[in-house]
Image: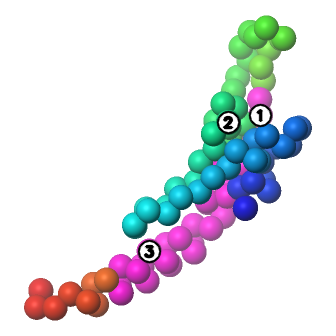
Amino acid sequence: TRAASRAPRRTGALAASVSSDITGDTASISSGSAYAGAHNYGTGPRPGLRGPHNIRRTQWLTGALADRGANIVWIMQTETGRKLGRVRGA
């Protein structure tokens, strides 16, 4: 939700393409849009069919994770501590 709300909007397709997945100990967030990377990291001038493509870096996707960095580290530490607490005889 945080990444979708930060996505640049012209048609709303970029925000609608955001998905997340939690599998075991791994969490991921991604976008299926072909332009997600260009909007997140930016692109320099290059020729295109409709003129040059200068897309300013917005970090809408990676920024959403960076904003939550402290929470992510806390969750990882808590879960690691819980799992290590279950180990016996090590």
Q: Which residues are magenta?
A: 55-82
The residue lying toward the viewer, choosing from 46 and 27, is 27
Answer with mark 3 or mark 1, whichever residue precedes in sequence.
1
Quick check: 24 above or below 55? below
The quarter in which the C terminus is drawn is bottom left
**Whole-Å distance between the Cαs marked 3 and 1?**
33 Å
Camera-near label (3 vs 1) is 3
Instruction: Say which residue appears at 67% left-offset and 54% top-offset.
Output: 63
Quick check: 54 above or below 56? above
Answer with mark 3 or mark 2, whichever residue precedes in sequence.
2
Q: Residues within 10 Å of mark 3 (few under 14, many from 20)?
A: few
* Amino acid on which disc 2 is placed: Ser
Instruction: Say which residue appears at 67% left-offset and 36% top-offset.
Output: 33
Camera-near label (1 vs 2) is 2
User: Callout 2: helix, strand or loop?
Assistant: loop
* Amino acid on which disc 1 is placed: Arg
**Residue 46: x percent and y percent?**
71, 13
User: Callout 3: helix, strand or loop?
Assistant: helix
Res 84 quadrant in image: bottom left
Res 41 quadrant in image: top right
Res 43 quadrant in image: top right
Q: Which residue is mark 3?
A: 76
Tell which residue pokes out farthest to the left in this image. 89
In the shown orientation, is residue 74 left or right of residue 81? right
Answer with mark 1 or mark 2, whichever residue precedes in sequence.
2
Q: Residues within 10 Å of mark 2 (few under 14, many from 20)?
A: some
Q: Which residue is mark 1?
A: 56
**Whole-Å distance between the Cαs marked 3 and 2?**
29 Å
Quick check: 75 above or below 17? below
